[in-house]
Amino acid sequence: MVSQGGTIVNNLTNVAFCAGGSAVLDAGNPGNSFLWSNGSTSQTITVSAAGAYSVTITDANGCSGTLSTTVNVNPLPDAQFTPNDVCINEPMQFMDVSTIGSGSITGWSWSFGDGNVSQQQNPSHFYPSSGAFAVTLVVTSNMGCVDSLIKTFNVFPLPAANFTFLNSCEGSAVNFTNTSTTSVGNITGWQWSFGDGTTASQQHPSHVFGTPGIYPVDLLITTAGGCVDSIQKQITISPLPVASFTRSKVVKDLRLLSTALQESPAVFFHPGSGILEMEPLQHCKTHRLYIITQEHTMYL
């Protein structure tokens, strides 16, 4: 509204900016006096809050008029995303979970920390090497307001599974020694499969194979970061030997003498039953040493 006798040019327009920003309102009409609704008496004011603003302009003749404008403050988006640490050779899936109070998010700009970028909302990225990577997401609203977030995520190297053992005989315990390694973190899980239907989860297990044969033994290891590696080795379990021999002729009693002294022990061989027994000699009349082999019997 302008009082009679003067002219005021309306230079004010409605203003909008993003939260955290500000705008300069200019009443124009230099050389006049000004009175803003916030009490300021300068030609321009800087505002950072939304609302209605007005200014009364008075010229040298006392003519006055009032101009009004509306200031809108648009909300910032809140950038958020949720990937997880991964192992090398696995893609990292990024999930945008950004929000905004009013309006909508219309733009996404990703920087994966290895020189690669994407403008997808929920991209997937493959890291060819292990390490820690700082990932940046910048989101933009439909009103041009932006927010950004940086998070660091890990790409873990794979562990190297390995173990040692010694071939053994049936019925004997085999000790397996885990020698697996990892360059980052710790190995926290060991899963053994012995090839005979049995398993174990100890770091260094012991196992008895009941029958002879060749068994594939598998070890699967897991690190604290969830990375896995496996290895298979074959173990040979030998049968137990069977002791036997034959004799060339029948003798009634065969004594293996270690000494001919009275009351010394003797070994008796009974050809009819094949039994060896120990008993003391009461009276030694002869001294012969008998040698028994699988093929023949001889004495000295």
Image (cartoon, grey):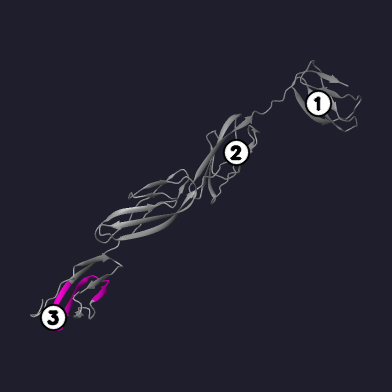
Q: Nearer the viewer, mark 1 or mark 2?
A: 2
Judge from the rendering whether residue 24 lies leftward or rightward of residue 251; answer left or right. Answer: left
Label 3: state its secondary structure: strand
Q: Which mark is residue 268?
A: 1
Label 2: state its secondary structure: strand
What is the three-letter code of the residue carrying label 3? Ser
Q: Nearer the viewer, mark 3 or mark 2?
A: 3
Say whether disc 3 or disc 2 marks the residue closer to the N-terminus: 3
In the rendered view, tell whether residue 26 sits above or below residue 181: below
Crowd around label 1: few <14 · some 14–19 · many ≥20 (10 Å): some
Q: Give the residue at mark 2.
A: 207
Q: Which mark is residue 25?
A: none
Q: Are marks 3 and 2 in contact (CB under 8 Å)?
A: no
- Magenta segment: 44-68
* Residue at 33 percent of width and 53 percent of height: 108
The extreme left residue here reads 4
Q: Give the residue at mark 3.
A: 64
Instruction: Tell me which corner region of the image, top left, top right, bottom left or bottom right, holds residue 24.
Output: bottom left
What is the three-letter code of the residue carrying label 1? Phe
* Residue at 82 percent of width and 31 percent of height: 279
Judge from the rendering whether residue 223 lies leftward or rightward of residue 285; answer left or right. Answer: left
- The quarter of the picture where the N terminus appears is bottom left
Instruction: Tell me which corner region of the image, top left, top right, bottom left or bottom right, holds residue 296.
Output: top right
Q: Using the rendered image of the protein, determine whether residue 73 is visible from the camera's viewpoint.
A: no
- The quarter of the picture where the C terminus appears is top right
In the rendered view, tell whether residue 243 sits above or below residue 15: above
